[in-house]
Image (cartoon, rainbow, N blue to C red):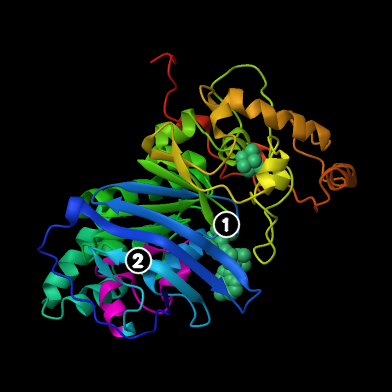
Amino acid sequence: MELTQHAQGEIEIDSTEPALDDVLLTVDDLHVTFGGEKGVRAVRGVSYRVRRGETLGIVGESGSGKSVTSLAVMGLLPTSARIHGSVKFRGKELLGAKDKAMSAIRGKRIAMIFQDPMTSLDPVYKIGAQIAETLRTHNPGMSRSDVRKRCIELLDIVGIPNAVDRVDDFPHQFSGGMRQRVVIAIAMANDPDVIIADEPTTALDVTVQATVLEAIKAAQRETGAALVLITHDLGVIAGMADRVLVMYAGRAVEVGTVDDVFYRPRMPYTVGLLNSLPRMDVDEKTRLTPIVGSPPSLQSLPPGCPFGPRCPLHIAACDAAEPPLVEVDGHALHLAACIRSDELKGQDRYEAGQVFETTSEDAGLPTDYAGPPEADAEPAAAHEAQTGTEFAPPDRYHAPDAEPTAPPAQHFPPQDGDAP
Ligand SMILES: Nc1ncnc2c1ncn2[C@@H]1O[C@H](COP(=O)(O)OP(=O)(O)OP(=O)(O)O)[C@@H](O)[C@H]1O
Ligand code: SF4
Ligand SMILES: [Mg+2]
């Protein structure tokens, strides 16, 4: 089935009818391509489900297709995007819905929080007026006083102090973190069933991040919504999500509960992501084991496994075909796309991560957590000679000071055997 979001179609949704198994959003084999035959294959067969009250974390490097997946769900991609697959809200197909039908769903049933609050807020209108507009759009019969009361209540829920007065402020009178909390208030204004938050804390410093995450949790508690939380930050995922979907080159390469993915990762890319974080749960200096190289071009993927050129476990068989996302040990909730997944069985992320030390050292990368990396030409040259691909340090390859959004390890859930 190939559809554009602007094809014809009505959507009738009975919100009083309970969703089957409480599943609110089902994305099935979603593909998005920009451009013609040799275009950018931004999303290549992503599937997921989210239930009422559940949080699905989506993580992956820049360009892995996280935002495009969400924009496809919201019907917000440009008309040039070729989309196929299925996106169902409460069992009703959204792909192919008319713009008018999608407008009724956006904001009311599925709300989105973007990275930069100023893309959602209009600087010339008061905060209260902007929340009120969302309320009135979907509840035209609401009285002025009820609208104002609800605006103040919403600001209060997301933690804006003295909401009664602040409701009449303009966005420039709020800090970045407060503005993002206003966006969250707008997102929850109409009691949505699904909230999609795309990097909601990336533009904020660590202390402010915590208040914004708290506001998202409050919004989810208040509405009971399913939350899809997109972030680079594995610490945020660990603290917020029930399940995790790891994306690489437009595909899901590992899916599982937070415990499965963080303690028992079975895909080398996930192992690499987890081990490129500083470790704070041990006293002695620990080594970072970053993933060398950069993601492949989505216009010309390597043969077989797209992670192959960066994978320390790569063997010739990996180039034969792209590994399917399959159950790990017959466990329906834990899936991985790697032909050598079994070899990671029984290892925690640190044990499994040792394989990356070899590639880091071979590439000449300093792996000592104590010092920031030197951006000199040598490691790049060594990497290029070894892999034939251009070296670009991964985003996370920074000392904590240089990367204020790097998650502190205490966000991780305790490990088996950890002291309580
Ligand atoms: N409108 C567009 N036209 C062409 N290519 C696009 C368009 N939007 C996104 N892309 C491409 O699709 C790919 C996936 O982009 P996407 O924005 O989903 O990445 P992401 O995982 O959200 O990255 P980030 O973490 O940087 O936000 C990228 O290669 C991007 O350049
Ligand atoms: S299939 Fe091969 S290249 Fe891909 S992640 Fe697994 S071991 Fe690495
Ligand atoms: Mg993005």
Separation of marks 1 and 2 at Cα, in angstroms: 19 Å
Q: Is residue 333 above or below residue 282?
A: below
Q: Position of residue 344 (x, y in %)?
A: 56, 28
Asked if residue 118 lies in the magenta stretch, the reply is yes
Asked whether residue 113 is drawn in magenta, I would say yes
| Residue 375 or residue 332, whichever sits in front | 332
- What kind of residue is marked 2? Val
Label 2 secondary element? strand
x and y, in percent, of residue 315 in the image: 71, 38
Residue placed under numbered mark 2 in the picture: 87
Residue 359 lies left or right of residue 281; in this view the side is: right
Instruction: Determine which of the numbered discs, if any, sits on residue 64 in the image.
Output: 1
Residue at (23% x, 79% y) in the render: 137
The segment highlighted magenta reads 100-127
N-terminal label among 1 and 2: 1
Residue 48 image point, x, y percent: 38, 53
Between residue 165 and residue 24, name the one nearer to us: 24
Number of labels in the image equals 2
Classify mark 1: residues with Cα within 10 Å, few (<14), some (14-19) or many (20+): many
Q: Is mark 1 within 8 Å of ligand 1?
A: yes
Rendered residue at 41%/72% (across/down): 121
Is residue 233 at least partly visible in the picture? yes
Report if the CB atoms under discs 1 and 2 are less than 8 Å apart: no
Quadrant, the C terminus: top left
Q: Nearer the viewer, mark 1 or mark 2?
A: 2
Label 2 crowd bin: few (<14), some (14–19), many (20+), radius 10 Å: many
The residue nearer to you, when weighing 239 against 89, is 89
Can residue 224 be seen?
no
Q: Is residue 407 above or below residue 352?
A: below
Q: Is residue 311 left or right of residue 388?
A: left
Q: Which image quadrant for residue 239?
A: top left
Whereabouts is ligand 2, in terms of quadrant?
A: top right
